[in-house]
Image (cartoon, rainbow, N blue to C red):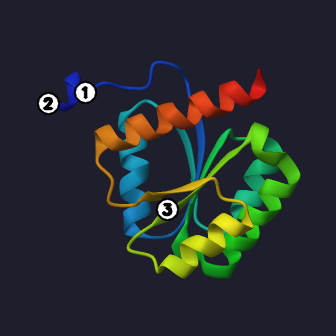
Amino acid sequence: MDDTHKPTLSQPTNLLLVGPTDSVRHVDQLLHRADADVIHVITAREARDAMTAVVFPIVLVDDALGEDGLSLIGELRRRYGRHRVHLTVLVDGAAPSHLERALLAGADDSLDKATTYDALLQYVRNACSRIELNVR
């Protein structure tokens, strides 16, 4: 299928993508193709700065950030609760213990960095639906 005929998100979707790896850059490219409004930052500090200006309803955090990423997830969960922000840890064959720690820190779920365009599109739509249900 040619990119001009790919389905996109039906409504504007603001996402914050946090991470330095090539896999995260791949996710960034896929999100842009889906017409998502993506801010991609490299560090947890940049993510904190971005969240002071705008509350992003969906935040995807690379597991490669390690302790900084876990700290960011915990801080955002405490600040915004489960109703305003959907937190996802991006994994790349991460050790189960790392994923478990991210979930304990406050991540809602995980997404494989090697995701396909269609799977990512569906994931973002589902996350948007969960946020909308929480706001009602």
Question: The residue tagged with tag 3: helix, strand or loop?
Answer: strand
Residue 32 in view, yes or no: no
Disc 3 designates what residue? 90
The mark lying in front, picked from 3 and 2, is 3
- The answer to whether residue 18 is above or below residue 28 is below
- The answer to whether residue 12 is above or below residue 62 is above
Q: Are marks 1 and 2 in contact (CB under 8 Å)?
A: yes
Q: Give the CA distance from mark 3 to mark 2.
A: 27 Å
- x, y percent for residue 106: 72, 60
Disc 1 designates what residue? 6
- Position of residue 73 in the picture relative to residue 59 (left or right): right
- 37 or 101: nearer the viewer: 101
Question: Could you say which disc has been placed on residue 55 in the image?
Answer: none
- x, y percent for residue 83: 77, 38
Identity, as a three-letter code, of the amino acid under mark 1? Lys
- 108 or 40: nearer the viewer: 108
Mark 3 and mark 2 lie on one chain; the one further toward the N terminus is 2
Question: Could you say which disc has been placed on residue 2 in the image?
Answer: 2
- 130 or 45: nearer the viewer: 130
The part of the image, by quadrant, that contains residue 86 is: top right
Identity, as a three-letter code, of the amino acid under mark 2? Asp
Residue drawn at x 40%, y 70% as measured from the top left: 92
